[in-house]
């Protein structure tokens, strides 16, 4: 039993909507893909106690995962350079409006921090 209250997918969706609205970003427009990311975030929260990026592995502690707690520190520069984050959960308004498909982008996390 965890010492933190569990999140539902609905909680996580609300969280992602709040972040995107606050930041002026858009959520991925593909409903099935978005659902997969939301589920991954919820599962990570319920397992680790924080929203570890659904596309990355834990380094073993909240402290060592600090840079990849969603929205990660690599999100703003990735949005700036590629129009979307590493997982393609968050998109810039411009990228979202372009109708382009997010593609694989390089991992910006320094190798020394990757477990
Ligand atoms: S890559 Fe996207 S989904 Fe992953 S932590 Fe960063 S902002 Fe969140």
Image: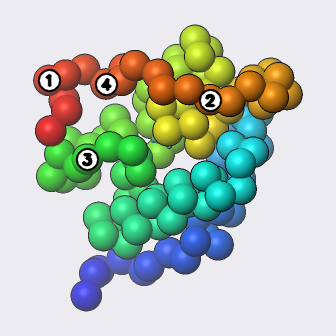
Most foreground residue, 98 or 70: 98
Quote the CA–CA distance across marks 3 and 4: 12 Å
Quote the CA–CA distance across marks 2 and 3: 21 Å
Question: Which of the marked residues, 1 or 3, is nearer the chain's N terminus?
Answer: 3
Quote the CA–CA distance across marks 2 and 1: 26 Å
- Regarding residue 75, the answer to whether it shows in the image is no
Q: Nearer the viewer, mark 1 or mark 3?
A: 3
Checking the image for residue 102, the label placed there is: 2
Task: Name the quadrant containing residue 96.
Answer: top right
- Regarding residue 28, the answer to whether it shows in the image is yes
Quickly name the residue at label 4: 109
Q: Residues within 10 Å of mark 4 (few under 14, many from 20)?
A: some
Q: Residue at x 54, y 59 (%)?
A: 36
Q: Are marks 4 and 2 in contact (CB under 8 Å)?
A: no
Most foreground residue, 100 or 45: 100
Q: Nearer the viewer, mark 4 or mark 2?
A: 2
Return the residue found at the far bottom.
1
Quadrant the N terminus occupies: bottom left
Question: Which of the marked residues, 4 or 2, is nearer the chain's N terminus?
Answer: 2
Q: Is residue 85 above or below residue 38?
A: above
Q: Residue at x 48, y 26 (%)?
A: 104
Quickly name the residue at label 1: 112
Element at label 3 = loop
Q: Does the Cβ of the disc 3 residue fall within 8 Å of ligand 1?
A: no
Q: Residue at x 74, y 38 (%)?
A: 26
Q: Residues within 10 Å of mark 3 (few under 14, many from 20)?
A: few
Q: Taking 60 as reference, is 21 left or right?
A: right
Element at label 2 = loop
Q: Taking 12 as reference, is 25 left or right?
A: right
Quickly name the residue at label 3: 57
Quote the CA–CA distance across marks 4 and 1: 8 Å
């Amino acid at each position: 039993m965890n010492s933190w209250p569990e999140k539902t997918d609905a909680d996580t969706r609300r969280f992602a909507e709040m972040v995107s609205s606050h930041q002026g970003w858009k959520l991925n427009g593909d409903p099935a893909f978005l659902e997969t990311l939301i589920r991954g975030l919820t599962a990570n929260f319920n397992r680790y106690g924080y929203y570890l990026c659904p596309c990355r592995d834990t380094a073993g502690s909240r402290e060592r995962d600090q840079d990849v707690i969603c929205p990660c520190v690599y999100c703003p520069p990735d949005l700036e350079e590629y129009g979307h984050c590493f997982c393609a959960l968050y998109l810039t308004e411009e990228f979202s409006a372009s109708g382009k498909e997010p593609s694989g982008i390089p991992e910006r996390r320094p190798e020394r921090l990757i477990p």
